């Protein structure tokens, strides 16, 4: 199934700060954009991928989430059904196509009996911006992910995994 549905509705798999709808709205407001139009959201799993920390975000003052293809792993997140203007807003926020690139991926919807996976847009850091070393997130960024996971009802085991992500020591950020 194509990530683009009828009536200009797009599915976006959010696994990082975009899961936190209040933060997404804050970004839109601070950047003079209309608030995001999220028509629906639901938990989903991206199989054979892992959450990795190989991108340094100047705006977040530490690492920001990215995906790596790793067999047997999985990333929980949220599918956001958005309109075209919100997809454009998210493209701008993620620096598509420069910093993060948007492509499609098959997802399994959490809590729905087996069936055909759905496709959604997924943002990944472009090769030019990948770091060779781990860039830990700040405590504030990790809190965003945990709050969003709780808000969207992701499993407690995944929330525990997010809470276990090592964070950057305060004052240790460099723009490198």
Image (spheres, grey):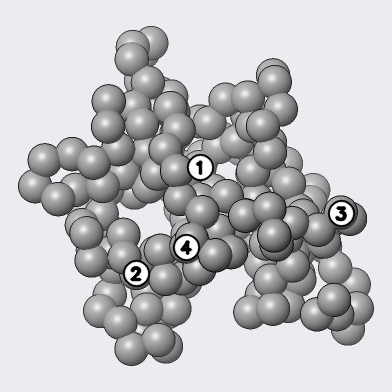
Disc 3 vs disc 2: Cβ atoms closer than 8 Å? no
Question: Callout 4: helix, strand or loop?
Answer: loop
Q: Earlier in the sequence, mark 3 or mark 2?
A: 2
Q: How far from the left and from the top, in percent, is residue 159?
A: 64, 44
Q: CA distance from mark 2 to mark 1?
A: 19 Å
Q: Establish if 165 lies above or below 92.
A: above
Quarter holding residue 91 = bottom left
Q: How far from the left and from the top, in percent, is residue 72?
A: 69, 19
Disc 3 vs disc 4: Cβ atoms closer than 8 Å? no
Which mark lies nearer to you, 2 or 1? 2
Quarter holding residue 173 = bottom right
Which residue is tagged 2? 89
Residue closest to the far top: 114
Left or right of 83? Residue 15 is right
Q: CA distance from mark 3 to mark 2?
A: 29 Å
Tag of residue 96:
4
Q: Earlier in the sequence, mark 4 or mark 1?
A: 1
Which mark lies nearer to you, 4 or 1? 4
- State the residue at coordinates (42%, 88%): 30
Q: How far from the left and from the top, in percent, is residue 138?
A: 76, 69
Which residue is tagged 3? 132
Q: Is residue 105 visible?
A: yes
Q: Earlier in the sequence, mark 2 or mark 4?
A: 2
Q: Establish if 4 lies above or below 125.
A: above
Q: Earlier in the sequence, mark 2 or mark 1?
A: 1
Which residue is tagged 1? 77
């Amino acid at each position: 199934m194509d990530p683009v549905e009828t009536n200009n509705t797009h599915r976006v798999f959010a696994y990082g700060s975009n899961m936190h709808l209040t933060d997404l709205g804050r970004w839109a407001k601070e950047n003079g954009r209309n608030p995001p139009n999220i028509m629906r959201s639901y938990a989903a799993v991206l199989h054979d991928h892992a959450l990795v920390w190989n991108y340094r975000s100047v705006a977040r003052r530490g690492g920001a989430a990215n995906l790596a293809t790793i067999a047997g792993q999985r990333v929980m997140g949220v599918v956001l059904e958005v309109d075209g203007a919100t997809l454009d807003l998210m493209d701008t926020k993620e620096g598509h196509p420069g910093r993060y690139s948007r492509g499609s991926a098959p997802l399994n919807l959490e809590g729905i009996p087996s069936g055909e996976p759905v496709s959604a847009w997924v943002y990944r850091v472009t090769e030019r911006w990948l770091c060779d070393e781990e860039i830990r997130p700040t405590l504030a960024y990790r809190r965003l992910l945990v709050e969003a996971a709780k808000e969207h009802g992701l499993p407690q085991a995944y929330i525990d995994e997010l809470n276990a992500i090592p964070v950057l020591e305060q004052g240790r950020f460099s723009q490198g």
